[in-house]
Amino acid sequence: MKTKLILIGGVPGTGKTTLAYKLALELGIDKVVSIDMIKAMTRTYKDNFDKYVFTTTHEAYKLENISIIEGFLKHSEEVNKIALDIVSNINDNVIIVEGATINRNILDLIDMEKYEVSYVNLCLDKENLIKRYEMKNRVRKGRWIENIEIINQINEYLMKDNFNIVNDNLDVTLERMLEYVKENLCL
């Protein structure tokens, strides 16, 4: 039997983590893998990983003077390889993986003989992203607002050729996500 992977991507502030944990509670899933936590753990073993692991989705392009999207994709690929390596060591029927590096290209890295995959991109318009970043900045300082143009460029890139859910209402988004996952993974 294949392990079912629920992949939730989107730029920072779209509600990936909140949705992942609410979805896990609703479906009785006890494994949620957070890309933020993986990145935090890799800092302990810096010498073992590519330089793209230790940046952010919206600052990776600066490492080699490449386009914003190319930097995002390089960063995502390196972090997603680590995430999938961790996932391969989890023995469970259903696993949720959430993070800003999750994008359509991760599907090329997944062994489809072992996994059945459902991928969704959470998105918001620029105005709502700014509102979320203002709220987040009250709790912890981030550089999201000063990078909004770059983040929004990545957001627009991710909204092409993906199954997108606009997360402007968590309850509605949760219902849509439940429907989508149950249909695609036969849960």
Image (cartoon, helix red, strand yellow):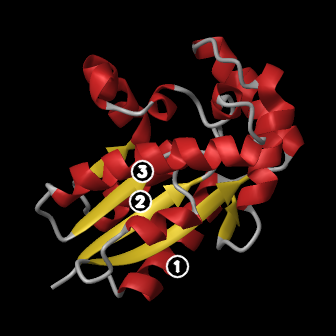
Return the x and y of residue 74 as percentages of the image width and height.
Answer: 57, 46
In the displayed structure image, the side of residue 40 where residue 69 appears, left or right: right
In the displayed structure image, the side of residue 113 where residue 102 appears, left or right: right
Label whose residue precedes the other's in the sequence (2 or 1): 2
Outermost residue, front side: 64
Instruction: Determine whether label 3 and label 1 are within 8 Å by CB.
Output: no
Q: CA distance from mark 3 to mark 2?
A: 21 Å
Query: Which secondary structure lies at badge 1?
Result: helix
Outermost residue, left side: 91
Determine whether 170 is above or below 163 in the image: above
For label 3, the crowd category at 10 Å Cα-Cα, with few meaning under 14, some 14 to 19 and many 20 or more, is many
For label 2, the crowd category at 10 Å Cα-Cα, with few meaning under 14, some 14 to 19 and many 20 or more, is many
Determine whether 50 is above or below 146 in the image: below
Residue 81: which numbered mark, if any? none
Asked if residue 100 shows in the view, the reply is: no
80 or 162, nearer to the observer: 80
Identify the amino acid type marked 3.
Asn
The number of discs equals: 3
Give the residue number, with chain letter if any, for mark 3. Answer: 80
Give the residue number, with chain letter if any, for mark 2. Answer: 23
Task: Specify the quadrant that holds the C terminus.
Answer: bottom left
Identify the amino acid type marked 2.
Leu
Q: CA distance from mark 2 to mark 1?
A: 11 Å
Taking the spot 26% from the left edge, 18% from the top edge, the residue there is 44
Give the residue number, with chain letter if any, for mark 1. Answer: 180
